Image (cartoon, rainbow, N blue to C red):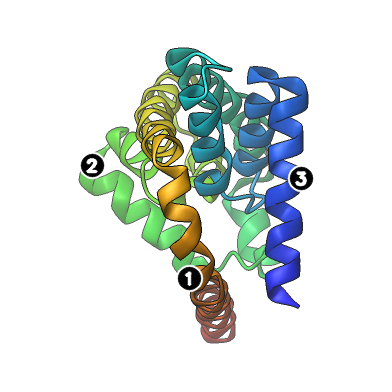
Amino acid sequence: MLDSILSGLIAWIESVITGVGPAGIAILMAIESCNIPLPSEAVLPFAGYLVSKGEMGFHLAAFAGAIGCVIGSVPSYYLGYFGGRKFFEKYGKYVLVSKKDLEYADKWVDKYGDWAFFLCRMLPVIRTFISLPAGILKARKRTFFTLTFLGSLIWSYVLVYVGVVLGEHLDKLKSVWHKFDVIIVVVCFILGCLYIYKHIKHLKED
C-alpha cells in the first residue's frame, strides 16, 4: 500500500519535471514551501539525474529549485503575518501547530537571529514549515526572502549534485536500490507518525 503510494508520488514528480523542465522544478518546490510535505529529496535528485543525461543545466536546475522555494514561501509567510500569533495559538491545533512550536521558533530566532531562517532552509522537514513562524514573528520581508533564497540555493545544489552522481552510476545502483524500497517507506512512515504524535501531545499539553 505505502510502497504503491510512494511509487505513484515519485512517478508524478518525474512526469512534471520531464514535461515542464525547470519550471516544473520550481512548481514542485513551491508546493513544498507552502507547508505541503512534498519532499524536495525526491524532486531535486531527479532533476540531477536529467542533468547527468545532458537534458538540463546543473545551475539552472538548482536555481529553479531555489526560486520555487521563495515563491512557495510567500503565501505561507503572509498567512502567518496576517493571522498572527493569537490566531495560531487559538486555531493552530487544526494544522498541528502548538504553542510549543511557536516557542521553539522563538528560541531559534533569539539564538541565531534572522540567520535561523537561512539555517532552517537546509534542514529536512523543518524547511517545509519555517515560513509560517517567520510570518508570525514578523520577520523582515526582504531579509527573510533573501535568506530563504540563499539557504534554498545551497540545499538545491546539494540535492541536484546527489542526483547527478546517482545518475552517472544508475545502472550499478538499479540492482540494489529496490531492496531498500521497503525500508525507506517504513522509515518515512514511522517518522511521520512520530511527528504527528509529538505535535498532538504538545497540543494536549497546551
Q: Position of residue 72 (x, y in %)?
A: 64, 32
For the question of whether residue 78 can be seen, the reply is no
Which amino acid, by three-letter code, is at mark 3?
Trp
Sequence order check: which comes first, mark 1 or mark 2? 2
Residue 10 placement (x, y as % from top left): 67, 51
**On-image quarter of the C terminus:** bottom right
Specify whether 17 is left or right of 116: right
Residue in front for this viewpoint, 78 or 23: 23
Q: Secondary structure at mark 1?
A: helix
Compared with residue 9, is residue 54 higher up or lower down, i.e. above or below? above
- The disc labelled 1 sits on which kind of residue? Phe
Other residues around mark 2 within 10 Å, as few (<14) / some (14–19) / many (≥20): few
> Do tag 3 and tag 2 residues touch (Cβ < 8 Å)?
no
Residue 180 numbered mark, or none: 1
Residue highlighted by disc 2: 112
Which of the two residues, 24 or 179, is positioned nearer the viewer here? 179
Q: Earlier in the sequence, mark 3 or mark 2?
A: 3
